[in-house]
């Protein structure tokens, strides 16, 4: 076991051993703070998408066809709001040979989310779908010494603009933690008895056809905004690095999986 895993095990053990510390409430004030913040981000994204030159935010380190994707913190990455933690990260990549049409098709292929984003996405189903909009149910899991399973419902909207650029917005309507997942006794934990590892998760994709040197492709960008529990008093030095790293590493995985899916022969056909 690595030193990092040992620290994670100790931290989670202390978290669940501490009286009245394992369960966490999502307060109305925290949810309002989240909604207020994402409203500001969405206004900024709408302004970005109004012109070709600003469609994607400028990110350093992704300037050539051979460069890897970059993940950067927004407003520090993680900060406290109303007895909760708000997280905001942005990732940018250039995918040679891909097109905006392929990116949009990938993002709208809801039934294949478990295939394209395994093992993080366990299952997905479409609740309703119309032109450019959908509502889906999705089960995700995170493994950090313990496995956390979450069932969520999301509203999505996506659009291709002038065949050269497009966007896809995913907003969480609800997320519930599942106990005994995969067994005959699985059930959602009662509100107030959840561990609070993820209460809300919104994702905002922007993508645009571009040319890097002599290579045509698509530049993709994803901003992920999430809301989690705060940290029990006295355990911050152990718990904060774990909770802080969850959103960043989840976004890194999502970008890696997206690039891989875009580069498969079936996607490029």
Image (cartoon, grey):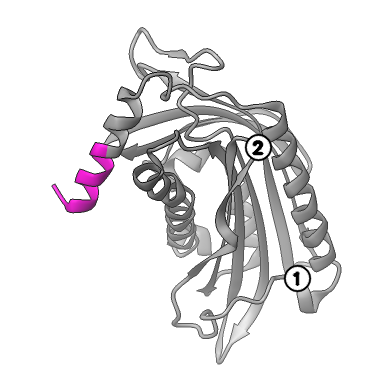
Please say whether residue 269 is visible from this viewpoint: no
| Side of 227 where 178 appears, left or right | left
Q: Main secondary structure of the magenta part?
A: helix
For disc 1, the neighbor class at 10 Å (few under 14, some 14 to 19, many from 20) is some
Please tell me which residue lies in front, 70 or 88.
88
- Tag 1 residue: 55
SS class, disc 1: loop
Q: Position of residue 232 (x, y in %)?
A: 45, 33
- Can residue 244 be found in the magenta stretch? no
Percent from the top left, x then y, of residue 54? Answer: 77, 75
Residue in view at x 46 percent, y 21 percent:
23
For this orientation, the residue located farthest to the left is: 1
Between the C-alphas of marks 2 and 1, the distance is: 32 Å
Q: Residue at x 55, y 91 (%)?
A: 214
Whether 254 is drawn above or below 196: the answer is below
Disc number at residue 160?
none
Residue farthest toward the top in the current orientation of the protein? 185
Q: Give the total number of marks visible in the rendering.
A: 2
Find residue 82 and name its label.
Answer: 2
Residue 7 against residue 150 in the figure, above or below = below
Q: Residue furthest front?
A: 234
Tell which tag, 2 or 1, sits nearer the viewer: 2
Image quarter of residue 153: top right
For the magenta stretch, what is the residue range?
A: 1-10
**Element under label 2?**
loop
């Amino acid at each position: 076991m690595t030193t990092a895993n040992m620290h994670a095990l100790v931290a989670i053990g202390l978290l669940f051993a501490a009286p009245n510390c394992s369960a966490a409430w999502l307060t109305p004030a925290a949810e309002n703070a989240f909604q207020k913040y994402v409203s500001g981000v969405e206004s900024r994204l709408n302004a970005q998408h109004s012109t070709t030159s600003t469609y994607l935010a400028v990110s350093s380190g992704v300037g050539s066809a051979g460069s890897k994707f970059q993940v950067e913190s927004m407003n520090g990455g993680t900060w406290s709001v109303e007895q909760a933690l708000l997280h905001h990260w942005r990732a940018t990549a250039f995918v040679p040979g891909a097109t905006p049409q392929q990116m949009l098709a990938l993002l709208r292929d809801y039934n294949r989310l478990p295939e394209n984003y395994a093992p993080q996405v366990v299952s997905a189903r479409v609740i309703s779908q119309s032109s450019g909009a959908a509502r889906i149910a999705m089960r995700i899991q995170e493994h950090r010494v313990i496995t956390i399973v979450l069932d969520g419902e999301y509203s999505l909207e996506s659009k291709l603009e002038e065949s050269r650029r497009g966007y896809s917005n995913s907003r969480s309507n609800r997320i519930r933690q599942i106990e005994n997942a995969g067994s005959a006794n699985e059930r959602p934990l009662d509100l107030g008895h959840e561990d609070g590892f993820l209460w809300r998760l919104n994702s905002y994709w922007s993508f645009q056809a571009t040319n890097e040197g002599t290579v045509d492709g698509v530049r993709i960008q994803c901003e992920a905004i999430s809301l989690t529990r705060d940290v029990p008093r006295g355990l911050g030095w152990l718990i904060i690095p774990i909770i802080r790293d969850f959103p960043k590493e989840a976004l890194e995985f999502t970008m890696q999986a997206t690039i891989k899916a875009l580069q498969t022969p079936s996607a490029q056909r």
